[in-house]
Image: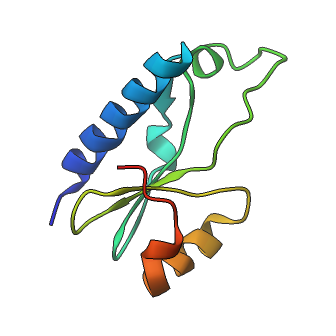
């Protein structure tokens, strides 16, 4: 089992690696982190959008990430409600795309 701080480090490392490959920098939206019995939901955005919220061209990208409390696995969500993905994770997390 991992704790919230470990989960945060895992997702930050994943976003850092992803951003390097894409030539962008991502940041977590800390106040949007959501815990449920099996993991955490982490929302993120591009750093420049977070630092300049007035900017007209908002980033629209992938959905939040879920981090598994048991093994620290990182799972992608999509455009449906986060409740849909949490429910899917609870029932059969193998149906979600594991990123790490």
Residue that appears at 43% across and 58% down: 98
Residue farthest along the right direction in this orientation? 56
Q: In this view, does 55 lie to the left or right of 13?
A: right
Q: Position of residue 78 (x, y in %)?
A: 66, 56
Q: Which residue lies furthest to the bottom in this view?
A: 91
Most extreme residue toward the left is 1
Residue drawn 82% across the image and 19% down it: 57
What colour scheme governs how the chains and residues are painted in the rendered image of this protein?
rainbow
Q: Residue at x 73, y 56 (%)?
A: 79
Front in this rendered view, residue 34 or 86: 86
Say which of 34 and 15 sits in front: 15
Q: Establish if 81 lies above or below 31.
A: below
Task: Tell me if 48 is positioned left or right of 75 in this view.
Answer: right
Percent across and percent down for residue 24 are 55, 16
Locate the N terminus and report the quarter of the image it occupies: bottom left
Q: How many tags in the picture?
A: 0
Front residue (pair 29, 82):
82
In the displayed structure, 2 sits above or below 51; it is below
Image spot of residue 56 (x, y percent):
84, 17
Residue at x-position 46% and y-position 29%: 18
Which x, y percent locates residue 70? Answer: 22, 69
């Amino acid at each position: 089992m991992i704790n919230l701080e470990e989960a945060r480090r895992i997702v930050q490392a994943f976003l850092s690696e992803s951003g390097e490959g894409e030539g962008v920098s991502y940041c977590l939206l800390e106040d949007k982190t959501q815990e449920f019995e099996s993991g955490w939901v982490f929302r993120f955005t591009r750093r420049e959008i977070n630092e300049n919220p007035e900017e007209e061209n908002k980033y629209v990208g992938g959905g939040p990430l879920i981090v598994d409390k048991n093994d620290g696995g990182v799972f992608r969500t999509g455009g449906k409600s986060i409740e849909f993905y949490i429910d899917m994770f609870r029932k059969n997390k193998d149906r979600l795309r594991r990123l790490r």
